[in-house]
Amino acid sequence: MSAPSAPVALPRSRHRWAAVTGLLVLSPVSAEYLIGYGDSTDRPLELLAGLLILAPLYGTVAVLIREITRRTGRGWPTILLLSAACGVVQAGLVDQTLFDNEVDPGGPDWSTQPLVTLVPGLGVDAASLLTYVGGHVIWSFAAPIAVVESCAPRIADRRWLGPVGIGFLVLLWAVSAGLIHLDTAADSTAHPAQVAGAAVVAVALAAVAFTVRPMRPRSSTGAPSWWLVGGVTGVAWCAGQLLPATWTGVTVNVVAMVVLSVLLLRWSRRRGWGRRHVLAAAGSALVVRAALSFLVEPLGDDVDLAVKYAVNAAMLGGVTALLFLAAHRLRRQEPSTC
């Protein structure tokens, strides 16, 4: 796939605003709802109302990451690095869950296990770091961006917002992040040095994001089938979600993600690599997260499991339908005339 270029003109309003709205919604749904852990997972109307808070917190960031990347003519390395930077901001500065090392004795089994992967001197749990920051990179930002761009392939490399739209989303995120921070700051166990360290890491990741350029195909070898890409990435996402929160689990997870990253990098430089392959990798992440929701014990003691499973099934069905739509749009993609 050729390197994206920074476009001059905005696409038609109905096309770009449909894409923006889709990303504003898919990002928080992927981040918080697909896995089905919340205590409101059996209350669909409450889930819909929750988007009023989560869309400004997650969706705005996903749109801005994508907008910055496409405006500067960069590609997926920049998206992933900016996603990591924003993941650190979210977990280390906004809600500060990255430094919450206290176990809730009243929570479900998965939340009451002792933290055994604390990094000495940093006060950061390695398993939590992978869950929060890694989770933001994959499910909050990167995968939703890839899927929504696949649903709108004609404008995928073009900017979707003007200055007013960008300013509005920045303001919306700032208000939402401020409210979340005020709500969680009183219970935070983070030390000022930890918060400062998270800020430095986030700035460093963002700086590196603007030093990398998209990879151009350099191999005459053909790219693998996009079905193979989806299968391999799906196994990796599934393993990463199911591994225990131990040093062994963390080590295996990190090794698996490094191997997967190298493999995807090599494949992406082969002849014929395109948006279908990107959709396969991103779509498998959403499918795995939605499928595993049936195994997740939700927070709270009064969750109606029958309704929860119905919501889980609806989420899985919705994700599947969205991926079929994206694949259909990619098949009939034509040069943009907008």
Image (cartoon, rainbow, N blue to C red):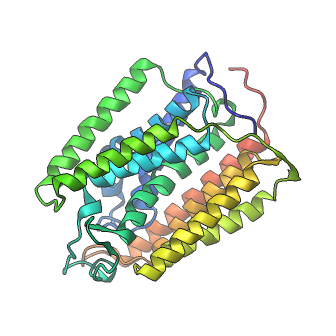
**Image side of residue 8 versus residue 337, left or right:** left
At x 25% / y 67%, what residue is drawn? 123
Whether residue 293 is situated above or below residue 7 in the rendered picture: below
Q: Residue furthest left?
A: 186
- Horizontal side of residue 128 vs 22, given as left or right: left
Q: Nearer the viewer, residue 22 or 99?
A: 99
- Image coordinates of residue 69 in percent, x first then y, are 54, 34
- The quarter of the picture where the N terminus appears is top right
Measured from the top left, where is residue 73 in percent x and y? 61, 29
Task: Classify residue 104 by image quadrant.
Answer: bottom left
Q: Residue at x 35, y 26 (%)?
A: 168
Above or below residue 100? Residue 165 is above
Residue at the image position 48 percent from the left and 48 percent from the top: 141
Left or right, residue 250 beside residue 191: right
Q: Quadrant of residue 214?
A: top right
Along the line of sight, which residue is nearer the eye, 63 or 15?
63
> Above or below — where is 28 with respect to 100?
above
Q: Quadrant of the C terminus?
A: top right
Q: Is residue 186 above or below residue 117?
A: above
Which quadrant would residue 336 be assigned to in this image?
Answer: top right
